[in-house]
Structure formats: structure tokens, C-alpha cells
Image: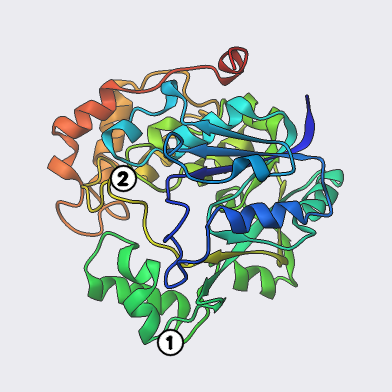
Amino acid sequence: MSYRISVILPTARTSKESIIEQPYLNMLEMTVNCLIKQTFQDFEFIIVDALHETRDFPFHLIPFPFKHVPVHENHRFWLDKKRWNVAGCLNTGLLHAEGELIVRIDDCSEFETTFLERIWEAYQNDLWLQAMHIRFFKGRPAKYDNEYREKGYEARYALMVTEEERFDVLNRIYGENGIIRDTRYETVKKAGGTMIAPYQWMYGYSTFTLEAILKINGFDELFDGDKSLEDQDCGSRLDLSGYKNKFLLDVSHQVIEHEHEPIPETIISRNVPNIKCNYAVYLLNRMRNRWKANTVKLTEEDIEFIRKESLKPPCSPKPNFYVDDCKGELFDLWVKNQNIFDLREERLSI
């Protein structure tokens, strides 16, 4: 069966006690309720779940097509080592997708009833509408204040720097009592409320066609093991492969993301050292015009480029930021376990 839209949600959070100071909110239930109310109904919902075997949720009550799947065995190398595995989770979702258009969302999110309708309307004009998020805390827009510095997710966990450095960065981004929201928002607002975004702005609640993402062979799993830039790299490779000027941003197309606790340490270890700089991998893909991911092994020259870039700014905000200066056992493990696959072929076995 085919659909117009496949909504993909990767998750590794527990259904309950994930929303900060609102334990009665179930982070899957709120998203499902939003999908039930959509004015556009030709969609399927795919949950890629790192907690698939233990998830406690009444899936039998979901009234629309959905798939609840574990992370595929070919795409969970780093997850099994309790490290970030975002690209592998997203590629798992793509294996199951039957929609013409892919909409990627995150957990702990809510959106308007016209969310999917607006995305499909933009697609009729050959544009891929991306959503921007606004954070909610205790049921209202989160502000960068003393309470947020004490309890907010970014204030406690974002950026692997000292607390003082973290607060300084967040203050520069949001300002005292500023609303915690997507950093693209003000730029789009100043542009008149809508704009065609650069390729590196494809992140978060993103949209693209199944045809396009299969052409570039999904998300680059070289980005796994560490978290960041896997989606911006995907936008970059879509651009390199010929999908240019597609990403539409609109200030009225937003998603509420409730302030949430981190993924449990039983799934993803916290405060683990970084293996390498993902920005270096992003740069390498652009330099080599490698728009099709997960198809060739890195050369010695590629590996040395990533190592050197990782050890200098902007990759290294401070000395010894990367474990063993990208020369130890963890870096070698990453080099020796590059995942090579073809998503089109894997889809045939699903």
C-alpha cells in the first residue's frame, strides 16, 4: 500500500516521565493525538523505537496506519554500544516508508491540525516545507530565565562544555528572558515571514521526497557514534545531487516541543567523549562531491583530513575535546566499522 506522506519519528525515550515537570503527559500520546486530528489523512506513521521490546503504549487504539519497528539490525552498530545512532534510526524508518513525501518529526512534540496539509500544499508547488520548533515548559513558551537555567534541557545537557560556558552561549542565542525557539526563526521573520532556506538549514522537523532520499542513499552513518549535523549533511547532499532551492521556511509553520529529560543512560551513555568532529565529515562530503552516502569506505587521506579538522577550530572548542586526539581505540573502531549498504536493496527485504 502507498501513501502520500510517511511521518517518521525516531525515539529512545520512555513514554512517561519524559516531559520535565509534567509527568502526566505521555510523549507519544500527544503526538498521536495531533496526527488523529490532521485535516490531511493520507499518511502513515512510522515509529523507529530503540525501546521497541519494552515500549508500553496502547498501539492497538491508533486509528490510522502506523508501523512500530525496532532499529534494523544492519543500522544499530553504535546504538548497541550505547552511543548516538540518529542516522541509523532514520535509515531504518526509510526502509519501511511507503509515502511519496517523508516528514521527519521528533518525540515530545505537538503541532496544528493543518500541519500535514500545509506540507502537502507546499509540495504541490515543488517545495519541501520545513517546520521550526518552539520550546514549551510547563505548558507555555519557555524563556531563558533562572528557572530554565535550573531545569531546562539545553541549560543542563546541551553542548559538552562547562556550565558557565553553556550559560554564556545560551544567553547569546536567546538573551535574558528570551523565548527558547528555533534559531532560524528571527532570520525568516526579518525576510518577511517566509524564505527559501540554504541547504544547511535542513534539520529538525524536515521534509523531503522518498525518491530524493533514496537517490542519496539516506542519512550518512559516518555521523553516528556522535550526535550532530547528520541532517544538515543530508540537506547538503540533496543539494549536491540536484535538489536545489527546495527548502521552504515559514514562521507560521511551527512545532511545539515540550522540554524533556534526556534519553535514559541505559540506552545512550551520557557525557561520553566524542570520537571525531561531524563537521569534518560534512566538509569532506562537500569537498569530494559525495552526495551518495554509505557506498564507499574512507581512504587514508579522508581519515587524516577528518582527524586534522577535528583537532582545530571550529571543531575543537578546547584542547583534548576528542578522545585520544582521534588516534585511540574508539577512533579506530569508528574507522573499521563504516556501514556500507544500499537502501533500495534493503527495502526489498522488508
Question: Which quadrant holds residue 207?
Answer: top right
Count every numbered label the image shows and give the total: 2
Note whether 91 is above or below 135 in the view shown. above
Element type at mark 1: loop
Residue 30: image location, x then y, percent: 61, 59
How crowded is the residue under tag 2: few (<14 C-alpha within 10 Å), some, or many (20+)? many
Q: How is the image coloured?
A: rainbow
Distance between mark 2 and mark 1 Cα atoms: 32 Å
Quarter the C terminus occupies: top right
**Residue 216 showing in the rendered view:** no
Q: Return the residue nearer the eye: 25 or 308.
A: 25
Q: Residue 199's spot in the image, x, y percent?
A: 60, 48
Residue 127 in sight: yes
299 lies left or right of 20? left
| Residue at 48% from the left image edge and 38% from the top image edge | 49
Which residue sits at x=74%, y=41%?
A: 64
Q: Amino acid type of disc 1?
A: Glu
Q: Tag 2's secondary structure? A: loop
Q: Which residue is mark 2?
A: 268
* Residue at (56, 20) in percent of width and height: 343
Relative image position of residue 293 (x, y in whole percent): 50, 26
**Is 253 placed left or right of 58 in the picture?**
right
Mark drawn on residue 176: 1
Mark closer to the observer (2, 1): 2
Q: Quadrant of residue 155?
A: bottom left
- The amino acid type found where label 2 is placed reads Ile
Which is nearer the N-term, disc 2 or disc 1? 1
Q: Quadrant of the N terminus?
A: top right
